[in-house]
């Protein structure tokens, strides 16, 4: 009896794994990834003290790093591109890394929440109504605390790996190789989304008509193109 149970369990985990391209991608270059992991230093998140005070809330910049990608990279993953990195980092707090890094024609996008090691797709809606607000020399991101984020959905399955239940993947060189092999060469950039008929269907995601207009014709995206360097000392944005 017990043996049947184990077989059934094995089959069901295999079935789940096969659906997620982050796990099922070929594990080539395992040695290379083993080496990279050895050298890797987890990016430091700025200390809470270093953050600007938010407008309406107690200082609460504690984002849940409850997926496998952010468990390694944190939300300060980007640093190479001085001008845009803070914005990539900020977007990572309300959308899965894979929205930008797993790019395929057939992908659709949904709001989701990670609950108890599962990715639960949510009814669509504007969960944050986020706004970047300029004050003195700083740019703030205002909005509600909410664990919801946008995830890509591919072949009916969300392309996201909850951390809970997958902790073993962090130490598994083969799994790390597969994950990165599944990602696209070119990640999505500002104009891929902030434009009319961009990669994300803002309306289908539940944004109000005014928000859709703001997001499509985003002044900050336009302004950044002309602005040479942006200084966000130590902040993730
Ligand atoms: C076990 C730790 C670990 C996990 C989990 C992990 N990464 Fe990485 N990632 C790394 C390391 C190490 C590098 C190489 C960094 C370097 O070369 O400076 C890297 C590099 C990258 C790069 C740069 C491109 C490249 O191929 O070198 C991207 C993009 C990336 N990771 C995205 C992700 C995403 C998205 C996920 C989740 C699906 C993820 N990573 C999961 C450790 C990890
Ligand atoms: C809004 C889109 C977007 C999101 C969300 C996003 N990235 Fe990126 N990421 C990019 C782009 C674009 C690049 C390439 C930047 C370049 O070419 O200068 C990049 C580059 C990287 C790199 C290379 C190092 C660097 O400094 O550029 C890593 C590592 C990485 N991303 C990891 C992640 C992880 C982990 C997450 C989620 C926590 C994530 N990304 C979320 C767009 C995004
Ligand atoms: C994958 C699509 C995608 C990419 C790529 C992307 N964004 Fe966004 N961006 C969004 C979404 C979705 C929101 C709305 C978040 C919300 O309100 O919940 C947003 C919000 C914003 C806002 C706030 C706008 C407002 O009206 O409140 C700014 C500013 C912004 N993005 C700038 C950028 C910049 C700069 C880049 C490139 C570095 C970028 N975005 C890349 C999808 C994207």
Image (cartoon, grey):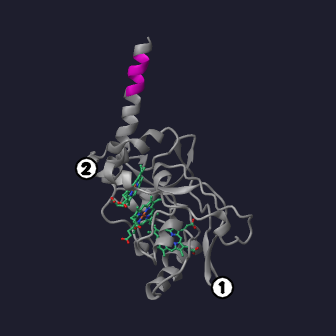
The answer to whether any part of residue 203 appears in the image is: no
Magenta part of the chain: 4-10
In which quadrant of the rendered view does residue 61 lie? bottom right
Secondary structure of the residue carrying tag 1 is: loop
Question: From the viewer's perspective, is 175 left or right of 222?
Answer: left
Which residue does the image show at 50% across and 63% down from the upper left?
A: 76
Q: At 44% from the left edge and 84% from the top edge, which residue is drawn?
A: 225
- Considering every residue shown, the one lying at the far front of the view is 39
Quadrant assignment for the C terminus: bottom right
- Please give the name of the residue rendered at 59% of the width and 53% of the height, measured from the top-left corner: 64
In the depicted view, which residue is nearer to us: 220 or 203?
220
Percent position (x, y) of residue 95? Answer: 51, 60
Q: Label 1 near label 2: C-beta < 8 Å?
A: no
> Mark 2 and mark 1: span between their CA atoms?
47 Å
Where disc 2 sits, the SS reads loop
Identify whether 234 is placed above or below 63. below
Q: Which mark is residue 194?
A: none
Seen from the viewer's position, the closer of residues 227 and 192 is 227
Residue position marked by numbered label 1 in the rendering: 136
Sequence order check, earlier mark of 2 and 1: 2
Tell me if residue 167 comes above or below residue 220 in the rendering: above
Position of residue 177 measured from the top left corner of the image (x, y, whole percent): 32, 48
Q: Which residue lies under the disc numbered 2?
A: 29
What is the residue that sits farthest to the left in this orientation? 28
Magenta stretch contains residue 5: yes
Q: Is residue 237 magenta-colored?
A: no
Q: Is residue 179 left or right of residue 116?
A: left
């Amino acid at each position: 009896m017990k043996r049947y149970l184990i077989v059934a369990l094995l089959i069901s985990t295999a079935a789940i794994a096969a659906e997620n391209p982050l796990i099922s991608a070929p594990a080539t270059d395992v040695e290379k990834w083993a080496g990279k992991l050895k050298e890797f230093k987890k990016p430091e998140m700025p200390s809470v003290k270093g953050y600007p005070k938010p407008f309406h809330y107690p200082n609460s910049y504690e984002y849940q790093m409850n997926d496998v990608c952010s468990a390694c990279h944190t939300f300060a993953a980007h640093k190479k591109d001085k001008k845009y990195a803070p914005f990539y980092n900020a977007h990572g707090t309300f959308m899965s890394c894979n929205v930008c890094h797993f790019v395929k024609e057939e992908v659709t996008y949904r709001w989701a929440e990670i609950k108890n090691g599962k990715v639960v797709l949510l009814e669509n809606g504007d969960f944050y109504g986020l706004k970047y607000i300029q004050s003195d020399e700083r740019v703030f991101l205002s909005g509600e605390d909410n664990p919801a984020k946008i995830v890509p959905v591919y072949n009916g399955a969300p392309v996201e790996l909850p951390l809970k239940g997958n902790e073993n993947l962090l130490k598994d060189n083969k799994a790390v190789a597969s994950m990165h092999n599944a990602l696209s060469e070119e990640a999505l950039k500002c104009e891929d989304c902030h434009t009319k008929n961009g990669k994300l269907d803002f309306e289908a995601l539940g944004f109000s008509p005014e928000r859709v207009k703001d997001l499509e014709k985003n002044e900050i995206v336009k302004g950044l193109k002309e602005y040479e360097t942006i200084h966000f000392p130590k902040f993730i944005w």
